[in-house]
Each structure stands twice: as C-alpha cells, then as structure tokens.
Image: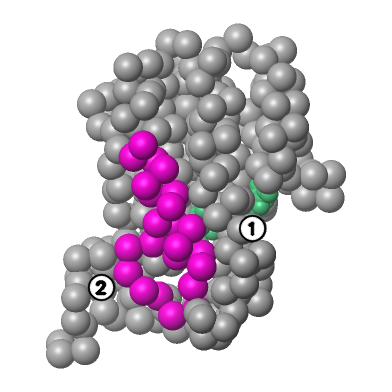
Amino acid sequence: MSSYTPTYPHQPLGGLLKGKRALIAGVANDRSIAWAIAEAFHAEGAELAFTYPGEAMGKRVIPVVEQLEPAAILDCDVASDASIDNAFAQLKKKWESFDILIHSIAYTPREALDGRFTEVTTREAFRISLDVSAYSLIGLTRAARPLMSKGGSVACLSYIGGEKVVPNYNVAGVAKAALEASMRYLAEDLGPDNIRVNAISAGPLKTLAAAGIKGMRTMLGENAEKTPLRRNIGHEDVARAALYLCSDLAKNVTGEVLHVDSGQNIMGVVSMR
Ligand code: NAD
C-alpha cells in the first residue's frame, strides 16, 4: 500500500523470510511488540496473517494490520477453544500450510498487578493469567501443527519476571514461568515434526500491556542505568530476534529463551555498583 510508512523501520537483510507465511497473534496497536515483528517480517518478504480477540479489538487492530496487506485477519480469543478452532478453520481456507506462528499475548487482571502477591493473587486472577498468557501457547500451537506440514517455527514473548521476582508483576511472572516451561515441552514434542519452538525474553517496552504494570516508568529508567549495556531496548531489537529465531538462521535452535534485555538477566546485585 503506497501510504504505508513503517512505525519501526527495518534495515532489510535480503529477503530472509521470502516464501514464508507467518501468523501473528498479539497486535493491539502500532506500539505492540507483535507489530514491530510484523513490520520486520513483511520487509523480509513474508506473507502475513493476523488475529485479534473479539469485535471491539478488531475495530482498532484491522486498520493497523491492513497496511501490510495480510492474507487474513481473524477473530481469535485464545481463552476460547471454539474461537481458536474457528480462526484456524478460516485460515485453512486461505493457506493450506504456513511456516511461522508468533505468540505475543498476555493478560492478567489489573488488580493482581498492584500490591502484595499473597493478597492480590486470587484463584480467579491466577486462572485467567495462566490461561490467556501461558496455556494459549499450547492451544495455538496445537491448532497450528496440522498446517505446519513442512515444518515451522513458533516464537512467544516472555519477560524476566518469569525467572526472578519483579515487584507488582506478581502472577504475570508465574504465567511467564509456565509459558517458558510450556515452550520447552512443545519444543521436545514437535521436534520430530521439524517445528521449532522458542521464546524471546524482552526488556521493558512501553506498550498497552506494559501500561497496566505499576512501576513501569521507574523500571525503564533503572534499566537505562543499571543493565550491563546501560540502555533500554527498542521494539526493533525484539523484531530482529524474532527474525533470527523464525528464519533458517536458527534452523537448529529450539527450546531456547533468547534474552533481548541489554543484559539485565545476568545481573545479581546492582546496588553495589
Ligand atoms: P500489547 O498490549 O500490545 O499486546 C498484548 C496482546 O495480547 C494484545 O494484542 C491483546 O489483544 C492480546 N490478548 C490479550 N488477551 C487476549 C485473548 N484472550 N485472546 C487473544 N489475544 C489476547 O503489549 P505487548 O507489550 O506488545 O505484549 C506482547 C507480549 O510481549 C506479551 O506476552 C507480553 O507479556 C510480552 N512482553 C512485553 C514486554 C513489555 O515491556 N512490553 C516485555 C517482555 C515481554
């Protein structure tokens, strides 16, 4: 489309994903990590399809993703098996097979993201957070597998809160731990199908989902000072990591958590510096 101007311009690498088809789940707006990934994949020659959860989100998402002239834009609420089944039935009408699945989805009820973990982690908040943020990787991958008949690559988005304690991230961190463990079990299970499954653990980025986390602004400030590289990451850094993991460059990489966080995850104590 001639009026399209990239939000996250990508220095082309020569058609790394030419001939590949990628289904991208998790664009909410042009600040979404999934959007940066979509733009880079598009620039590298991939054909794209997108999902959004429900009609109300669709009104916001469709005008954004249409810019990349996708093969399909599908309603898919990952909290519902019927919605997943329906989305993949629709996708099958467009694509007889595809190569890449991006899972860039998380949700935790806001009241569980502020306050003492013991007090705010209700059974219901735990259920919703783990279902939407972690189980959904299994649900989507199960639905994708029959269409990944030529092999493929699945990548999901994680965060350091799944490995170490991040105050206020609370049960969202527990969900990331479950996401990363699910990723490894999927990688082992789908290896014989030549389907690779990996995670990118990204540093903090200003997005809609991140806005719900108390202390995000402080975290961005601290990262710029306290990570080994002394700077924050950008959306385009995550997009490039996804390009690597989903292209043939990573053909023997599976079950991996690739940290794109200026080195934050290697630090134990930073207060002595
Ligand atoms: P975002 O709000 O743009 O994306 C979150 C997406 O999850 C949205 O598109 C939303 O529609 C989708 N979603 C929520 N519930 C859903 C449901 N029931 N069915 C289908 N989709 C649903 O925010 P983002 O920061 O781009 O988040 C993308 C991923 O990156 C998440 O997994 C998030 O945890 C992860 N992540 C974000 C950061 C950060 O700092 N922003 C850091 C590390 C990891």
Residue, far bottom: 272
The amino acid pointed to by label 2 is: Thr
Label 1 or label 2, whichever lies nearer to me, is 1
Residue 10, image quadrant: top left
User: Which of 82 and 229 lies nearest the eye of the viewer?
Assistant: 82
Q: Residue at x 63, y 13 (%)?
A: 95
Rendered image coloring scheme: one colour
Q: Which residues are magenta?
A: 162-185
The amino acid pointed to by label 1 is: Ile
The answer to whether one can see residue 203 in this image is no
Task: Tell me residue 234's x, y (percent).
Answer: 42, 59
Vertical side of 107 occupied by 113: above or below: below
Q: Residue at x 61, y 51 (%)?
A: 132
Vertical side of 222 occupied by 65: above or below: above
Q: Residue at x 51, y 37 (%)?
A: 138
> How would you classify the magenta stretch by its main secondary structure?
helix
